[in-house]
Image: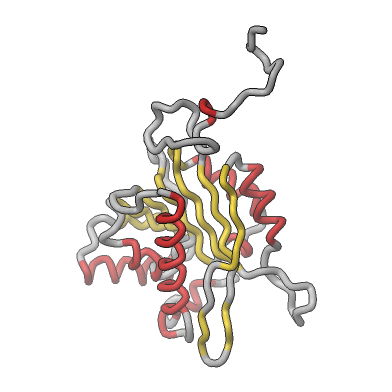
Amino acid sequence: MAWDAYAAGWDDQPGVKEYARAAFGALVALAENDGFELSGSRACDFGCGTGLLTEQLVGLCDRIDAVDSSPAMREVLRGKIAHHGWDSVGVFDRLPQLHDGYDLVVCSSVCAFVDDYPGLVQQLVASMGPGGLFVQWDWEFDPDDDEPFGLTRDAIRRALGAAGLVSVSVVTGFEVIAEGQTMRPLMGSGRRPCQTHADPGCGPPPLCLSLQPRAAGAIGEHR
């Protein structure tokens, strides 16, 4: 899909700003319920487009890396950054390498458009630090639609689980009505577990692998 052609007028399309605000609201509720601290986090908005979700995260996250493959989309976001003076936001055409890993990775209406969705999730989870939170919003696949598109709940669960995330959840993220059309995207989420209880962002099981009960006869266990 040629996203460059949509960049200049993207923010004026019906429902896109409401969608971003609703996604952010769902993220805040998820974080509060999961005991995840959004304030001061290092975030990646992957597939950021013109930065409508990035805008919501500014002032809450310490650092936001906004990533998009579309030069025109990135240019719109850079204009917003210059206008508002958002010095905590960086814009990239690909996923940067962060030494300590991201605390938060969000993908808003991105994953259903990529060729290798499970592979992308693997890459994004690998960029996260221990205890990190991954969240995606995507359209739910409905085979009865005239032009079926999106992801199934099972596909999201499998991809997040295969990437090593724990506390995986797939729910209807929110509901937004724009020009008589109701949008109910799926929200998939999970946490990257920590290996030892000393890792930053660690918490109780299942988040901390070192606190998980081991099965009897496990390798290295003495009877």
- Give the total number of marks visible in the rendering: 0
Model colouring: secondary structure
Residue at the far right in the pictured view: 144
- Observer-nearest of 53 and 87: 53
Using the image, determine if residue 60 lies above or below residue 79: above
Q: Is residue 120 visible?
A: yes
Residue at point 37%, 34% (across, down): 200
- Observer-nearest of 111 and 190: 190
| 102 on left or right of 114 | left
x then y, percent, for residue 48: 44, 63
Q: Is residue 93 visible?
A: no
Q: Quadrant of the N terminus?
A: bottom right
Residue at point 60%, 63% (across, down): 171
Which quadrant would residue 11 be assigned to in this image? bottom left
Using the image, determine if residue 45 lies above or below residue 209: below
- Observer-nearest of 149 and 60: 60
| 201 on left or right of 190 | left
Residue at the far top in the pictured view: 223
- Observer-nearest of 19 and 49: 19
Residue at point 39%, 67% (across, down): 51
| 211 on left or right of 81 | right
x then y, percent, for residue 97: 42, 41
x then y, percent, for residue 175: 53, 77
x then y, percent, for residue 2: 56, 72
Which quadrant would residue 73 be assigned to in this image? bottom left
Residue at point 58%, 75% (across, down): 184
